[in-house]
Amino acid sequence: MNAALGHTGVLLALVACATGAGVLLYGLLRQRTAVVRSGRIYAFIALAGALLATAAMQRALLTHDFSIVFVAENNSRSTPLLYTITGMWSALAGSILLWGLILTGYIAVMVLRFRRSADDALVGWATLVTYVVAVFFFALMAGPADPFRTVAGAAPTSGLGPNVLLQDNALVAFHPPLLYLGFVGFTIPFAFAVASLVTGRVGELRPGVTWQSITRRWTLFAWGFLTVGIVLGAWWSYQVLGWGGFWAWDPVENASFLPWLCATAYLHSAMVQERRGILRVWNLSLIVSTFSLTILGTFLTRSGVITSVHAFSDSDIGPALLGFFGAVVVVGVGLIAWRGDRLRSAGGIDSPVSREGAFLLNNLLFVAFAFVVLLGTLFPLLYEALDGQQVTVGAPYFDTMTLPIGLALLLLMAIGPALPWRKTNTSTMSDRLIVPATCAVGVIVACVAAGVRGLGPLCAFGLGGFAAAANVRQLVLSSVGSRRRGTGAWRGLVGRANGGMVVHLGVVIIAVALAAATSYGHRSQITLQPGTQATVDGHVIAYDGLARVSSPARTATEALVRVDGQGPYRPAVSQFGSGTDPVGTPAIDSGLLSDVYLTIDTLPSTATGPVGIGVTVQPLVAWLWVGGIVLVIGALLAALPGGRRRPTDPVSAPVPAAAARPDDRDTPGEDNDGSDARTDESSDHSPDLVGTRYR
Amino acid sequence: MTVQDVKRTRKTHRARWISLAALVVAGAVVAVLATRPPAQVSEVDTPLLGKAAPAVSGTTLGGGHFDLSSLRGRWVVLNFFASWCPPCQQEEPEMVAFAFHHRQVGSAALVSVVYDDSTSSARSFLARSGATWPAVVDPDGQIAVDYGVRGPPETFLVSPSGKVLVHLDGAVTESALDHWLAAAERGET
């Protein structure tokens, strides 16, 4: 019953997407507006199919229908309700189903959002692309990754339950869906990128709505989810895996980080395009890269090619995903090769020391970052193919290579927002940077005085202070300006630029926490008799004794440990379900200044014997998660519409009469039938020296 | 010809050439990924074949005590590994998958022995990869000597009666382990 319902849902979605793609292709090629308009209805049929399949899967899990292989392998009668529900994404086939559900959800929202321009060729092509992507994923479910495959013969009376590591923390309910909302969300920007390449239009969809603004909003949306997903993943790893770390440059982590880097680069350079009309092809390339990297990442981590904690299931979908990645690259890059030269704008960057110059440098740094991570992830595979030898690329490579890029980004984060568009002069810059620079020096002096040593972390703290002060300065000026205009100070926090400043603050918090935790973290091992205590890195660790706890889902031996008199904390060795091997469960004393991370390293042979406790003390770890929250708040603020700048408000350095030659000026629309994203160029000819809003 | 025209003529096709170069690179990467050699694992001879498995007893990384004799009656995959060895890193997810698919009661058990590695690196390595089976610390290397292990990864299949039946050298895959296990269960080794 469940299997039949599920198969029906998958097939319904598959057929709907395939039909929709066919209808749209016909309508677009023959230019039948009515046909193109009719193509959107299939999005809702596909969503209904995906919902049906998901409901069938949840019903099968909740009713323990072990006749379905996926349920038998990922559920048992003793699995708690929460992990029964999350069982859907604890292995490959169910994850693909979640992917399909989210994708069809996105398509439906997109179709609704653009219902008034449904007969526009740009929207038509974009919808077509999303249908084709959906066809691929539902075809996977209909074929090699069938979540509703039934067991041969009689159904087993009980299942095996999900992987023990996935039954330990409620974060599994949130981390994968949020990550997927991010990953899958990049399909929409990609679809619009392809559509604008096919139609040759980067201009307005309707007055005020450009390809650019659509794509930026959707990318920001997906980027926000991906950010939360990544941060929660790090948190899960920290809470559950018991090695005291949160980021291991594991291929799966890299796979989620790569699209994040590309999307971050795009979110910055998109502003240059909106403002100056340049970098169009570059932006399209970033969008194509972001989407391609989500597929490559999925291939790398879901096909058993690469080692990782997430390799819970090997599968036969590797070749399909690799083929799809190849197709995405060929279509995306091929279209850029075909159309790119026509879409390019004639304008250039006037001065490297300008806002757009800073954005360009930012993009180069982000792309270099992505390249370093991609190379480190793929290098073992490429090297083995060429040389036959196996090598590994570990954390030292990533740490060494990404540290200078990270520091350079922090520096840029401080200077960039202070730079005006087009060009600047020394007095403007010294005016704007004197306070942040003073903060930077103050932070370094304070750190050195407090006994902090080490060039890398000191650089990170100093640059962090520089960037934080520069961004706070922007927010304050913006709020003051808003209040002066009578729109309320809070207005100075919303909108693209201001939300971006809040995001920057989140990044600074994470960077500082990361530098502190990785540079000054220390792991040690102590052996304690019950009732005794020891001092580790300034913390008093006292061991009270053992406790055994037992619930239907978990039996565990817990060590009762007090840290500085607080507690007891309960690091444990837990067994989930019967017949499985016990796994270590860490306990964490989390504080604003430092975390004390406790694991059981050696269980005593008798209840009164000595226990080996692993103690990892890392400063500022909790701020990683705080920074993550600030990032998300910033992304939300950036998604809200900010106050429109009045066309008369000056924002840029003046263009001297001599510089206003046609070849020097950015001339939007000159090479794409006048339909370019029209930006507020008028203000660039304002005689004012400095802007009010971006000061 | 205006200045703009000159500029446009000069830069024509730049996007095309860069795109084509990107395509070639991506194509090469796809080709490499698509033609990856299968994991290199081979069955090698050892004087232990058919003999009783030497004792494996000691502290586990998880903090408990382990003794191989406690698993008498089950098939045991005994794996010697180190966090510093690339093939060990390569085979780890395969082992995780094997353990995951054999986690029902009475099925084949997986046991790892730390080979020439610090306890903390080994623990961190296994924790990060999601390994949940016992890993025995072998501080003086006696277990490795008893089994004649020369370099990790090496994997032994021990029968329910405690005999060494298969000795594999190199990174294993889940399917290879399943293959040897099935062959051993049929009595073909």
Image: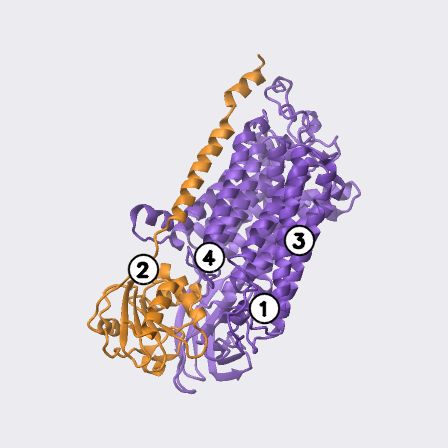
Q: Is mark 2 on a helix, strand or loop?
A: loop
Q: Where is residue A537 in the image (x, y as percent from the top left)?
A: 44, 68
Snapshot quadrant of residue A649 = top right
Tell me the residue at 42%/39% (across/down): B25
Q: Is mark 4 on a helix, strand or loop?
A: loop
Q: Where is residue A154 in the image (x, y as percent from the top left)?
A: 53, 75
Q: In which quarter of the image is the C terminus of chain B?
A: bottom left
Q: What amino acid is at disc 1?
A: Ala
Q: Mark 2 points at which residue?
A: B85
Which residue sits furthest front?
Answer: A153
Residue A157 is left or right of residue B148, and the answer is: right
Snapshot quadrant of residue A71 = bottom right
Proximity of marks 3 and 2: CB atoms separated by less than 8 Å: no
Q: Which of marks 4 and 2 is in front?
A: 4
Q: Chain A is drawn in which colour?
A: purple
Q: Colour of chain B?
A: orange
Q: Quadrant of the N terminus of chain B?
A: top right
Q: Residue A193 carries which label?
A: none
Q: Residue A316 carries which label?
A: 4
Q: Name the residue under label 3.
A: A46
Residue B93 is left or right of residue A25, and the answer is: left
Proximity of marks 4 and 3: CB atoms separated by less than 8 Å: no
Q: Position of residue A495 (x, y in %)?
A: 69, 44
Proximity of marks 3 and 1: CB atoms separated by less than 8 Å: no
The chain under label 1 reads A
Q: What amino acid is at disc 3?
A: Ala
Q: Is mark 3 on a helix, strand or loop?
A: helix
